[in-house]
């Protein structure tokens, strides 16, 4: 069983938005100009991480910095349907454009179809974990299943990885859409980028043993791509074989173990990573082994889907 230690968490959403219209664009209800509204996650702006400094083959003057924009939401505030046509993400430094990335309509379509499926399943926890949708969108806002947004509904796109050859301090997003009569509207939003350097010193948060970090805030890890888990670390204990559990490797790799104690990480002490105050303790979580083991005739994908859904409850 995995033991998870999450150090640092930047969640929720930020909204710094203004709306512009192109000549002849569709006007919203009551004659206001806010046909589109943009919201983004995470809340406190983007965290830029130093990805590469000079040396070891790279000879640039400036380091490379990377960041992930987890979710962009577009809400139709007009009284008529609007169809998303595209958009852009601009990185700026002291008001100077550093680079531009196109927002793909195909990516909007992919994300919205997945989010709409989760909504249809009433899987709000999944929407929140993957997109910060529940904490971002106004109550009652429906997620459109396609890029055609009914009045009051929202579209979204996720997982834009950005890398620049200098440290940006601002991100500017633009999205444009069209009405059925061909008239077009656009919206822009800007929010800050900062480089986070921890003022704290942390110790490894588990008792002595052979531990393996399975997931971390890197590009090849699933954690980096959602605001709720971007800075999370997944850790498991291993033996001399690299196995996570006692017994035959095929047993635990297929999700079947006779007892919890077979997992090496089970019941191990989790230590404080730094000085602090315990604000909550819970010991009433039920983990029935028969549920967490893989069912007979259950495929690997079905097993992962079932366990993943339970972990997000």
Image (spheres, rainbow, N blue to C red):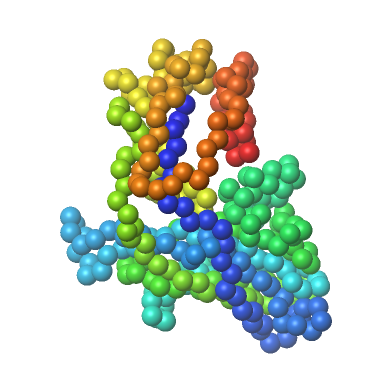
Question: Vertically, is 92 above or below 250?
Answer: below
Q: Classify residue 94 by image quadrant.
A: bottom left
User: Residue 210 at x, y = what percent?
Assistant: 30, 27
Taking depth in this image into account, of 43 and 21 the one nearest to the observer is 43
Question: Vertically, is 18 above or below 60?
Answer: below
Q: Classify residue 60 by image quadrant.
A: bottom left
Q: Is residue 31 left or right of residue 222?
A: right
User: Residue 269 at x, y = what percent?
Assistant: 39, 30
Taking depth in this image into account, of 185 and 303 the one nearest to the observer is 303
Residue beneath the point at 27% across and 65% down: 63
Residue beneath the point at 50% across and 60% down: 69
Q: Classify residue 133 by image quadrant.
A: bottom right
Taking depth in this image into account, of 254 and 88 the one nearest to the observer is 254
Asked whether the viewer can see residue 140, the reply is: yes
User: Residue 175 at x, y = what percent?
Assistant: 61, 71
**In what quadrant of the picture does the C terminus appear?**
top right
Residue beneath the point at 68% across and 73% down: 36
Question: Vertically, is 74 above or below 23?
Answer: above
């Amino acid at each position: 069983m995995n033991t998870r230690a999450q150090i640092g968490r930047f969640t929720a959403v930020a909204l710094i938005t203004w709306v512009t219209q192109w000549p002849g664009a569709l006007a919203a209800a009551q004659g206001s100009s806010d046909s589109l509204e943009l919201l983004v996650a995470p809340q406190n702006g983007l965290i830029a991480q130093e990805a590469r400094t000079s040396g070891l083959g790279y000879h640039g003057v400036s380091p490379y910095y990377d960041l992930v924009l987890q979710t962009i939401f577009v809400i139709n505030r007009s009284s008529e349907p609007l169809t998303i046509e595209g958009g852009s993400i601009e990185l700026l430094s002291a008001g100077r454009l550093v680079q531009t990335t196109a927002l793909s309509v195909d990516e909007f379509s992919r994300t919205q179809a997945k989010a709409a499926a989760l909504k249809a399943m009433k899987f709000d926890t999944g929407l929140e974990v993957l997109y910060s949708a529940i904490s971002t969108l106004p109550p009652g806002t429906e997620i459109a299943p396609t890029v055609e947004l009914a009045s009051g509904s929202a579209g979204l796109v996720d997982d834009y990885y950005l890398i620049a050859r200098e440290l940006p301090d601002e991100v500017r997003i633009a999205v444009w859409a069209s009405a059925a009569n061909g008239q077009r509207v656009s919206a822009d939003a800007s929010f800050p980028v900062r480089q986070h350097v921890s003022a704290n010193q942390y110790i490894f948060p588990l008792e002595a043993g052979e531990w393996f970090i399975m997931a971390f805030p890197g590009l090849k890890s699933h954690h980096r791509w959602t605001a709720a888990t971007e800075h999370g670390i997944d850790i498991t204990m291993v033996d001399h074989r690299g196995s996570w559990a006692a017994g035959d490797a095929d047993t635990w790799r297929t999700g079947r173990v006779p007892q919890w104690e077979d997992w090496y990480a089970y019941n191990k002490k989790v230590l404080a990573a730094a000085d602090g105050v315990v604000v909550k303790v819970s010991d009433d979580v039920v983990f029935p082994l028969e549920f967490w083991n893989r069912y007979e005739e259950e495929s690997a994908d079905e097993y992962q889907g079932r366990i993943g859904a339970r972990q997000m409850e």
